[in-house]
Amino acid sequence: MSIILFARDPGAANMISAVLPALPSGVTLYAKDYARDLFGRENIAFIDFNRQISDKNLAPSDAEAVESWLSQLKNSGDRFCMITGTTNLEDFTDRLIWEAAATKGITTISILDQWYRAKERFVTAAGVYRPDYILAPTKELAELLNAEGLARKEALHFGHPYLEKVFTFYSSLVNNRDILRQKLADHFHQKFSVVVVLASDPQRYLSAQGLQHKDVTYDEFDLYNAAAQGFRESNLSDELFIVKLHPKEKRSDWSHINANILCDEFTPYELIVACDIVIGTKSMMLLEALLLGKIAISVNLWNVASERLPSHDAGLSQEVTSLAGLKEALNECRPSDTIPSDYKQRLGIEADWAAIIKKLTAL
């Protein structure tokens, strides 16, 4: 059986890039939108979905485009399965793949890259979309998805290959730490001993697309103002404070903010290696930072009732709910570059994902 992969969002691209080494040679990878940049940076060969199939955000009414594409693939004669990520409500390509494949006898496997709001990836206002298999980061999430019947066949505890990839690359990345910190000093013309990075949250973009979670009452500038105030009032106020924009954000949107802003001048890996502390809401960058031995602080000043990152319950990161709490957390930070030896168990990502995906793609 041959394997065809599809990724659109950065999280899906990260997961796909991590599982590729476990798959047999000769797989075919389609990339759309943001995923193309990530695969390009890692020199991973892909077919440009935007050019060959469609470059627009596909809605439920665009099912014909995906059905036609899958029919062409199936008519090539090879029996294949499809591995996808998941995406949010602005684009339905993943979901349309699952539904079209089900009518054509093509097995679909969807890999979740996040713990929180997982159900929303499958249950939408337009209906419920179900792949054959869902690969979930934790056992508890897999059980929840099975209880909801969101996989046609089964949701499985898969672990988190991308976070393992981050951990594996730690030794090679950390050797460049001093060089990267000097590049930051040169870029911002500032001397420092501690680097604090705020992982921005594109809430205005999500709101404009009708995708903002109902409990969210803040935007990225509220987050910045809170984080910047906590930083200024802390003992680190003379150090370097950087805002890392989300891929969906534009620098021009921040023209009214006097801040040290980075878009793509540094890769996320480089920035995490160079920094000491990462502040965010639910960004994957918090978990990446933890696995590279950094301090991660999750900010929830607006009492957003959403799932906690597993690192909170595991005691690997802290969640602050007030400016005073953020100031205190920053004052108590002692950067150490020490990775917990039991990080897999504490994050619940110790599943044998390579064996699982090999078994599913051989069915």
Image (cartoon, rainbow, N blue to C red):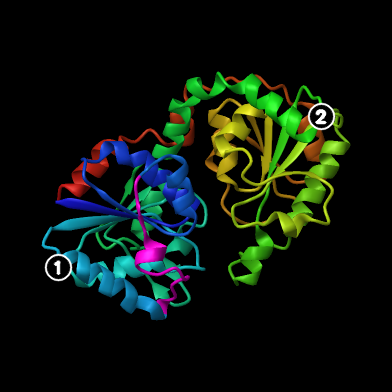
Residue 297, percent from left and from top:
68, 38
Give the image location of residue 344, x and y in percent: 44, 30
- Residue 160 shows up from this direction: no
- Is 146 placed left or right of 104 in the picture? right
Residue numbers of the magenta segment: 45-60
Q: Amino acid at mark 2?
A: Gln
- Please name whichever residue, 263 or 109, is drawn nearer the observer in this view of the structure: 263
- Residue 163 visible to the viewer: yes
Q: Give the distance between the C-alpha atoms of the residues marked 1 and 2, in whole angstroms.
A: 59 Å
Residue drawn 61% across and 38% down?
266
Q: Which residue is mark 2?
A: 190
Q: Residue tagged by mark 1?
A: 75
Q: Is residue 54 magenta?
A: yes
Q: Residue at x 57, y 31 (%)?
A: 290
Taking depth in this image into account, of 8 and 53 the one nearest to the observer is 53
> Three-letter amino acid code at disc 1?
Asn
Mark earlier in primary sequence (1, 2): 1
Task: Relative to 25, say whether 301 is above or below.
Answer: below
Q: Residue at x 21, y 41 (%)?
A: 25
Q: Would residue 111 be counted in the magenta stretch?
A: no
